[in-house]
Image (cartoon, rainbow, N blue to C red):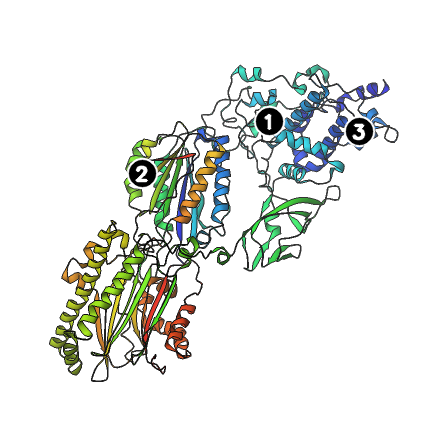
Amino acid sequence: MRRLPVYLLIDTSGSMKGEPLESVKVGLQAMLSGLRQDPHALESLHLSIITFDRDVKVVLPLSSLETLQLPPIVCPDSGPTNLGAALEVLCQRVDTEVLKSQGENKGDWKPILFVMTDGSPSDIMLYKETVPQVKKRGFASIIACAAGPKAKKDELLPLADHVVTLDTMDSGSFLSFFRWVSSSVAAGNVSMGASTEIHLPPPPPEVNLVF
Amino acid sequence: MAAINSLGTRNEQRQPLHKFLLGNRDLIQADPARIVLPLLRCLAEIHAEGKSHGAVCAQRLICAPNGDFDVALFRHRIGWDDALTAAETYYGYPNGQGVTMEEQQQRDKQALANVLHLLMLGHEVPPPPTRLNVSILSRLGEDSAWPQGFVSLVEHLLTVDGLEPTPELDALIHALSPPAPTQTPPPVPESSLPEIPTTPAAQALAPAPAEITLPEEATPDLEPPAPPLAAELADETPPGLPSDAEPPPVPPAVTSRDFPSPPPLPSYPVRLPNATVGREYSGNVLSHLATGALTFASFEPVSALPEGLTTNGISITGSPLQAGEYEIPAACLIQGADPDRPDKLLRTLQITINADPRSLWKNLASDTTSLFWKPDTDTGSLGDSPHLVAAASLRGRSHAHVGSCRDDDFSLAWFPQSGWYVLTVADGAGSAKYSRQGAKIACAKVKEHFSSLLGENGQDTLTPLTEAWAADADSADKRQMVKGELYNQFGRAAYAARKAIEDQANESQATLRDFHTTLIITLARPMATGGWLIAAFSVGDGGAAVVGVPDGATCLLTQPDGGEFAGQTIFLTMKEVLATGEGIMNRIKFALVPQFDALVLVTDGISDPKFNSESALADPAEWQELWTELQPLVRDATTRDQAAESLLEWMNFFSPGHHDDRTIAILCETHLPSKP
């Protein structure tokens, strides 16, 4: 059974506290509901959620869509945005969780990564060091979402194949974003062959694709 | 005013509610229902009288030394148990702050919510959409979160008739219920609550609530004195907070009591493991209901379970029929319930029932007007060949789901002049927009090439060399000659195919990448010696094998080009594939076999689900197994066309996660007559 591993990195730094995080949770729930309507996702998709603030937490280890339940996601009152540390953890997780074809083993589909942040990496040195490591992990696509006015989309460009921005951090924006994630995942990676990119569906109005 | 006087004589029994609750937290935790229920009932009754209670019951509610806190007791102690109406009972209570009664009652609710919140502090705290404008909280800090909907929770609790267990009340009691093992907190807390602002603005934010503005002198004879608030709060500090947090806003007082930290707020409602339509489900509900020290003996659903599921009061089993998100209220019997407490709690069981993925696959017809359209299925068989040659190609579910075209293709040929069979399959890349045409061209061009070589008027260079080798199978030289000629012919066929695709790409103003396709070519011919020569050339995934060779070793004719991840392969249309002679040579395999059961070619839509790994693909036993599945289909067919149709039907098998196009071509002995 070939799995489609999808990693979600979610910013839980202090600035996400309150409505933004609540909106993210609602968005995640909507994303799951959407994915559960997609037969390909239901059979193949495995999702992992990693949150990052001062600490990096694997709140959901790679689990099949069929069995997974959304974990509680909390935010400290304040704290830095340690995206670099999160990427380090991500690389470790990918190395242990994602299967590659080898002899008796059948490989997974190429993993997909979504990163959502409302700021910029606080651990900028580590972030810059880790980006090339992430690139080596063979992601079919890395999509970064710069949410809200304080998010620095330029910082995300070296990491991501696609950067999208959300003008506001309200529930409508996040809902649109996660629905779009859901349709990206559903559309992508289906008999991808050697394609190096997934085909992203056109984003909804709230989600701006940065070129 | 007798009532007032009577109450006044019992001042020693009274204390502000929040102080009582905080000071007797252990009592509350020991038996939350006993405290919380009457408390709610008192306030509900007061409000039902059209009054507010400025002190939020604080001054007037009476608790017994054992912590009983109870309207009945209150009435009893007043001595008017029988005669007293609610109006009389609550006569003389001070009104709360606020201009209108509604405002005053709202203040009551806020204050009660505040008290309850304090008891639960340290639990999961949602962010503050609205801040609690009450001094207690402002002393905690401006950033202290006011649990979302807490006032409305209290409002709800106050308006519930009969105080039957409700989910809200249940959750509240549950949250206050005693933790399993009593842990002794550190004697001196290292820090207080995080992020406590000391700004006086916080104080200014809020109109002082009733219970705070009431002068302490109103209850000068508190017995026992309530422990200072700050000390209580310090005790509630969750462990693991940064030690450099702000100091407590109120100087730490002597901690008079060590309270076990309350259990976390149960994730309420209770979520059960996910189910899937049509799949056997078994979930032990009791193990999911249990939290902390609270365990349950059984449960009884209050509403119907999702169709297909049943329960024995302990677990839910069955095979669900309908996908969806379900919420099932259930009355849950507490294990070893205290006779004085409600023995049942209401829980809402949540269960996600996934759809059966099979039911979600759509079958949308492809758009016949799209460029390079091809039918969603195709079958073919050769009519006049001595052996049965049949093929079938089926659009995968992943394409059917979105109404896109089949990308696979095949071609079959037998040349009576030379006796050669040529079977070809190709798999267009799912990611390339015109790959269906790439596959089609590749198959057609291969057939065309070998037709010009082996067909009528062909300059057949292959037959003499192969016959020579067959007659002298041990000759390395003769084998080398065959190899050289296969290299020439397979190479030319592949080049011709790629050239034709390039031309097509140029013509369509597209790139070669848009036509990415794999290619598997097999040649087979019975030799004069009685054996067969079988040869194959492949680019990409899928596979071809000769099944049932007596030596048991000869089998896989192709070396699949797989990547480290699923779905990665290479294509005929990639520059590097035909770039070097060695590269082409490595793609060729050939053998002389004395006899065989079948030659089978499959695209990855079949090889992926049928072979678990590349090792399996090289295992003759696995191919034999596949042939065992296929053989009856062709054996039982009454015509060659029907054999192909049977293959098409078979290819519709379901394998989770494998929904690519499927194409198969076979060559085997047959009893079926030639087609007219």
Question: Three-letter amino acid code at disc 3?
Answer: Phe
Of marks 1 and 3, which one's residue comes earlier in the chain? 3
Within-10-Å neighbours for mark 1: few <14, some 14–19, many 20+: many
Q: Residues within 10 Å of mark 3 (few under 14, many from 20)?
A: some
Amino acid identity at mark 2: Leu
Distance between mark 1 and mark 2 Cα atoms: 48 Å
Depth check: give the residue in front, B260 or B173: B173
Q: Where is residue B191? Give x, y as percent.
A: 50, 26
**Which residue is identified by label 3?**
B74
> Given the image, what chain letter belongs to the residue carrying mark 2?
A
Q: Position of residue A48 (x, y in %)?
A: 43, 46
Q: Residue furthest bottom?
A: B529
Quarter holding the C terminus of chain A? Answer: top left
The percent position of residue B366, horizontal first and vertical second, equals: 40, 56
B66 vs B673, nearest the viewer: B673
Determine which residue is flagged by label 2.
A159
Residue located at (17% from left, 80% from top): B467
Q: From the image, state whether disc 1 or disc 2 is nearer to you.
A: 2
Are there few (<14), some (14-19), or many (20+) residues within 10 Å of tag 2? many
Q: Residue B133: horizontal and vertical position, in percent?
A: 60, 21
Residue, disc 1: B232
Given the image, on which type of amino acid does mark 1 rest? Glu
On screen, residue B5 versus residue B519, left or right, reads right
Could you say which quadrant of the image residue B645 lies in?
bottom left
Q: Is residue A123 visible?
A: no
Q: Are marks 1 and 2 on the same chain?
A: no
> Does B88 sit left or right of A64 as displayed?
right
Q: CA distance from mark 1 to mark 3?
A: 27 Å
